[in-house]
Image: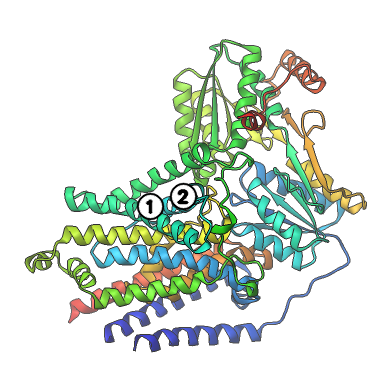
Amino acid sequence: MVKIKDMNIFKYTSLLLLSFYLSSSSLNLAHAEIKVGLVLEKSGKDDKSFNASAYKGLKKAEKELGVTTKTVEAPDNSAYESLQRAFAEKKFDLIVAIGFHQLEAVQKNADRFPDQKFLLVDEDAKKPNVRSVLFEEHEGSYLVGALAALHSPSGKIGFIGGMDVPLIRRFQMGYEAGVKKINPKAEIFVNYLGVTGEAWNNPPKAKEQALDQYHRGADVIFVAAGNSGLGVFDAAEAQKKLAIGVDSNQNWLKPGYVLTSMLKHVDESVFDSIKLLKEGKFTTGLTRLGLKSKGVDYAMDENNAKLVTASDQKKLAEIKTDIIAGKIKVPDYYLSQKKK
Amino acid sequence: MKYLLRSSLKSIAGVFLGLSLGLVVCYFAGESPLKVLKVLFQSSFGSGYDFGMTLFYTAPLLLTGLAVAIPFRAGLFNIGGEGQLLVGALGAAAAGVIGKDIHSPIVAILFATALAFLAGGIWGAIPGFLKAKRGSHEVITTIMMNFIAAGMTSYFTLYVIKDPDSSQAETIPLPAIFHLKPFAIFNGAPMGELIFVLIAIVVIIHYWLWNSVRGFELKAVGENEVAAETYGISKQKSWIFAMFLAGGLAGLVGVVEVLGNAHRFKLGFSADYGFVGIAVALLARGNILGIIPSALLFGILQKGSGSLDLETEKVTRDLAYIIQGLIILGVAAEGLYERKRVKRV
């Protein structure tokens, strides 16, 4: 009795779905131009941060280079492989995978589609048909750490990280070193928002932690937490203190309260790769983008022009030159872990 | 039987109500509802790989659906599936470290499975024990256990059995002897014989619940705990047992993910399987066998959500979540109707 009932469910649903399937026609795809598929992380193109930056680069390429683009946001961490694969099967010319979560999916698909070109940002795929881009986050963080120390009369400075993962530890380590360079006695408060993916998407909790740090005397807080950063900017405004944004230029979010943003030029790296592809100069292998190649930097615009003085900028320019010249060694969390 | 038939008709009605409302939303968003249905169907069954991925999403939901439905039969609401599956997956990953000298694949896989089941089971039994001995409400305790599980598994992943060669948050990879082989026909999708085992588990649980003394006791406590106690059935025992079994089954998600897919514990692997499991059990309306089509439906929606971004212009992955929500509403609204009718009689 029960079994018959369940079979009926299957029968009717499959009949119904089949009829829909047969009644609709197949997709038409134009072929002439260059097609680029972008696979974003779960947090998506509206995270005002890392993924937003990649999306911006793609849209710029669409406008200036006249390529056709398609963007997908992964619903979960198991979906990357099938989404990339769908692009490959549709014969897209380049598949851009954003974020370290996509490493294994890119590796598997690179083997499966050896003629397909990939761009992977934030991890090294070590495959012959993948262009991998890594950013030297610690260098940029060092710079904004120094700036934070310059704007902290109390010598108390905050850091709020998203999920407690090695990548964010790398931000933290570079930042702390930058702070200590200017003010060796500085006290640094560190908080992480959580240990699950929710940490990238939890502005209320970030706001609470930021308020707590401000109440303990922090003047400046650097937040590396994706979407959650918005909560820290709210807290900075409420307390009339300063915050530092991350990945994209976030100075505009709360003008006057965002000291600067540690830029990770994901947009440029995406745009440049598409440009190279169009010019037929696309290369695979690992590219490291640091201060030298302007892959990381701090953001200056009209929103923070009054906050960051000319003497600050001069000091930061000096530090930048020293890092590029190798006079300042910025500690790298990844390397510190490998020694153990 | 008549009741079962009527209740499953209600589920189907709920699904159709939710799905049609979702398609109306598509229509207003400017996308053809037929095309959206086609995308969902093709994305789930279009190729061997797609079907394999759909089953890969379905498999954890079979388990977490059971993890909600079984305690429900005993009168408990288990919201702790997410935590139980995390701990179970960690157990499976730890099996690779503890049992690295095992040489037989069967022993290795059974060992990892047992560890995943035990780890999840103990995690589930704790709220059951607190409920039985202290009267703590299981909704509160299971939610809290979810947070503890998230924190604990991250700690283990980042500091205890972290893969030193990876910059990501993941544990040491399992030796090849622990890996489950996927079917070749799925062309790369990580699903093999396991899906049959899981379906068999659902059928066995159904059978056990209706044909064993333990199962009867469990249901009796759920229906009326005072009456059950009067007949000498220990509600404490039934509660702890139901929660242990539920936690253990949720823990087996670790086998699907760790042995079958990633071959290690990766932070953030779960697509909220523990919570979607609640919806799966709700849609099945407490009918254990109903979990199979119900989990498949949610698996299809999960697999299809990414393709909505890819294949359509106006709607995104979020539509799949809207449809999920509407289906639940559709099923819940049926329940309201039912209560009204009974009153009138």
Residue B183 vertical placement versus A288 (above, below): below
Residue B184 vertical placement versus B116 (above, below): below
Chain letter for the residue marked with disc 1 in the picture: B
Report the colour scheme.
rainbow
**Mark 1 Cα within 10 Å, few/some/many (few <14, many 20+)?**
many
Q: Where is residue A204 in the image (x, y as percent from the top left)?
A: 46, 39
Name the element at disc 1: helix
Name the element at disc 2: helix
Q: Where is residue B318 in the image (x, y as percent from the top left)?
A: 55, 60
Give B186 or B274, whichever is nearer the viewer.
B186
Chain letter for the residue marked with disc 2 in the picture: B
Toward which corner of the image does residue A153 lie, by quadrant? top right
Q: Quadrant of the C terminus of chain B?
A: bottom left
Q: Where is residue B238 in the image (x, y as percent from the top left)?
A: 21, 62
Judge whether residue B21 can be spotted in this image.
Answer: no
Q: Residue at x 20, y 66 (%)?
A: B222
Residue identified by numbered label 2: B90
Amino acid type at image mark 1: Ala
Judge whether residue B196 can be spotted in this image.
Answer: yes
Q: Are marks 2 and 1 in contact (CB under 8 Å)?
A: yes
Amino acid type at image mark 2: Leu
**Mark 2 Cα within 10 Å, few/some/many (few <14, many 20+)?**
many
Q: In which quarter of the image is the N terminus of chain B?
A: bottom left
Give A178 or A78, whichever is nearer the viewer.
A78
Q: Residue at x 50, y 76 (%)?
A: B20
Q: Which residue is drawn at 53% across and 53% down?
A: B269
Residue identified by numbered label 1: B119
